[in-house]
Amino acid sequence: MMTNKNNALLASQIIHYAMADCFLGKLLVAKSAVGVCAICLADHNEELPQALIELVPKTTLILDQQSCQQELDQLLNYISTPSIGLNLTLDMQGTLFQEQVWQVLLKIPLGEYLSYTEVANRVGKPKAVRAVANACANNRLAIAIPCHRVVRANGNLAGYRWGLKRKQELLRRESEAVGVNSMTSNLINAHAPCSAIV
């Protein structure tokens, strides 16, 4: 997967997006001139454009199924069969610390997960556990930047922007894809807030 650092803010950019159904519900993929800049999940189609507006405010949004179809198809195939991998060009937009966290997340292998504390250690700031959680919460690129692979230190699920049931299902499918059927046995459907990150 390629990531491009775009020094210009997303504000005032034209963003094209497309939507589709998947086993996680409704899926939206949006891209800028640089690459995929947002991936959203929802229960209903009408929720997706509003979610995109919240993620990339002050942009011009154009529903354009054709121009986003390649990225959308690749993501749909990856969601269904995680073992095939994902090769999208990503337009990441965040602070330096957020992007450092996201780079760590991109390196978590399929079927594995890290705690918030472990991620903080890997970015060289072991006391910044809550900041790591905030970086995960501000990830605009669901699935592509796998913040769902970050859990509490005891293995339980913590908050996920797109819903804990989706997080649990993603982890279950990914573990099955690499033959680790017991991986999610201790990932309980604990409705813990994002602040519960110990």
Image (tube, grey):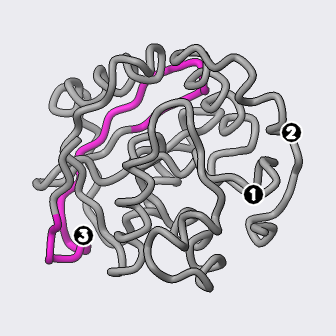
Numbered badge on residue 10: 3
Local crowd size for mark 3, using a 10 Å CA cut-off: few (<14), some (14–19), many (≥20): many
Amino acid type of the residue tagged 3 in the rendering? Leu
Q: Is residue 8 above or below residue 146?
A: below
Amino acid type of the residue tagged 1 in the rendering? Arg
Q: Which residue: 52% across, 16% down?
A: 177
Magenta range: 5-28
What's the distance in space between the residues labelled 3 and 1, CA to CA?
32 Å
Labels 2, 3: front one: 2
- Left or right: where does residue 191 sit relative to residue 97? right
Numbered badge on residue 142: none
Residue 194's spot in the image, x, y percent?
A: 74, 65
Q: Quarter of the image containing the C terminus?
A: bottom right
- Left or right: where does residue 28 sit relative to residue 155? left
Sooner in the amino-acid sequence: mark 3 or mark 1: 3
Q: Which residue: 43% across, 67% down?
A: 101
In front of the other: 161 or 135:
135
Q: Which residue: 11% across, 54% down?
A: 33
Amino acid type of the residue tagged 2 in the rendering? Ile
In front of the other: 175 or 82:
175
Residue linked to disc 2? 188
Local crowd size for mark 1, using a 10 Å CA cut-off: few (<14), some (14–19), many (≥20): many
What's the distance in space between the residues labelled 2 and 3, CA to CA?
37 Å
Sooner in the amino-acid sequence: mark 2 or mark 3: 3
Q: Is residue 180 above or below residue 63?
A: above
Sooner in the amino-acid sequence: mark 1 or mark 2: 1
Labels 3, 1: front one: 1
